[in-house]
Image (tube, rainbow, N blue to C red):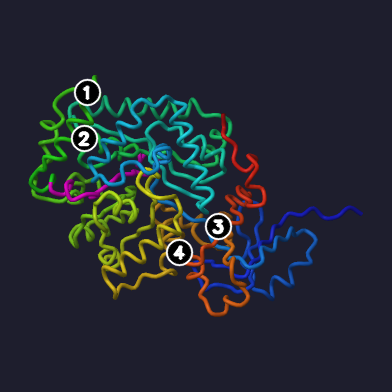
Amino acid sequence: MSAKPKTLRLLKGRWVLPVDREPITNGAVLIKGERVKSVLTREEFEEAVSRPELTVEDFGEAIILPGLINLHTHLEYSALKGLAPDLNFFSWVRALIAASSAWAPDDWAASALTGVRAALLSGTTCLVENSYTGLSARFLAHAGLRAVVGLELFGVNQETAPEQFANWLKKLDSVKEGADQSLKEALAEKRIKLAVAPHAPYTVCPALWRLADQWALEEKSMVLAHVAESPEECQWFGHGNQVVDGHLSFAFGRIPSYKGDPVALAAQWRGQNHSPVAHLNEARLLNERLLATHCVEIDDDDARLLSAHRTGLAHCPRSNARLRNGHAPINTYQENRLAFGFGTDSLASSDDLSLLAEARFAIALHRAINPELNFGARQAIEHLTLKAAQCLHMEGEIGSLTANKKADIVVFEVAHALSAREIAPQHDPFDLLIYGDGQLIASFVDGKEIFNRAQSASESTLVSGR
């Protein structure tokens, strides 16, 4: 009689962090197909381990938890790591545009692939990508990652908004038509979702943004935007700002076919004595479809508006600090019960794409600003997983190790120099994950292993797609 085929996969580790409930010591996660079947205690694992249909993987002194969710990336700029780190925000943006302006498609592709690899190796299983070319979608699909890829949209001419959005739709169609088999499958499975990304309230006029929002509503998609990122942006909406005016002239002046003076065109919504968030609210563009990135320059009134419209936020503390934009008021986020997660932004404005490093920086930063703030390792992990999933309205599918959710899982080794068996009883697993210099051992999306440290030297774990 032939052996019963192995249909279940059991992952065991020193700790399992389901996120939606307390950690389990010496627990395990049972996977059936692409979904979590159950999370087992030590006793349940010992009872189940002899079942013939099980493939058991014991990771030893490791932490098993839901895959990490990066809410804001620009993978296509990864080749520009370390770009002009001493410049302020708008000078840095000019340097970014200048550095990438002569790139050929192969340059964009190579840069995007670098970013995808960095994200994969840091324990990310789902990310939100703001894409200029759309090329990053292909490499995300090849890596087996889950992603929302927003194609960027720019335009300040209200009268030509329909024409500008029609051009964006052509760009979207080009990405779909140029998709290889891997991307086609990922789109069909909705592992990769395409979205619209109006760049920012000062670079996208309300008429064009409304067309984007209407498309997102009809397609049940997301709207990705940078909002209230810099003091200059807020000054521009309040009473005007010459730095932002200069940026508009520079950015749109580079487009020979662009019609009209961008500064004059934008005067309709510049200097209206309100904030970027209030501007979006007056234009009826705040809603649950919007993922607002940065939100550094917001006050209590802005936070109440964002909360009332169930708008999710992507917090990028390292990029904000690098580009001299200050720090987001995380206490205001908490007081107004805003849904937020973390984003690393690009390698051009951050040291790496590690969400654990992003969270570690955030904890230190916000404690330095407000020593009484209740935000530590446990809260950070929640915002890297379940709360980030809520921002994407995907909490029913990912973000916690819960029965019937997608088996998006990462496994981190937690100790090197010291014996984990000696130090573990003295440490909280959330603290070990954030502060313990853990190394990624394996990661899974839809129950499929997309990274294994033992095989990481092989290109079989991440093909280039070329």
Name the residue type under label 4. Ile
Tell me which label, 2 or 3, sits earlier in the chain. 2
Quadrant into which the C terminus falls: top right
Question: Which is more foreground, mark 2 or mark 1?
Answer: 1
144 left or right of 214 in image? right
Query: Which numbered circle lies on residue 311?
Result: none
Q: From the image, tell me which residue sits under label 2.
A: 207
> What is the x, y in percent for residue 267?
10, 36
> What is the x, y in percent for residue 246?
15, 35
- Tell me if mark 2 has few (under 14), some (14-19) or many (20+) residues whose alpha carbon lies within 10 angstroms of its own: some
Residue positioned 37% across, 61% down in the render: 361
Query: Which numbered circle lies on residue 405?
Result: 3
Residue positioned 66% across, 48% down in the render: 455
Element type at mark 4: helix
Q: CA distance from mark 2 to mark 1?
A: 16 Å
Q: CA distance from mark 3 to mark 4?
A: 18 Å
Q: Is residue 217 a member of the stretch shown in magenta?
A: yes
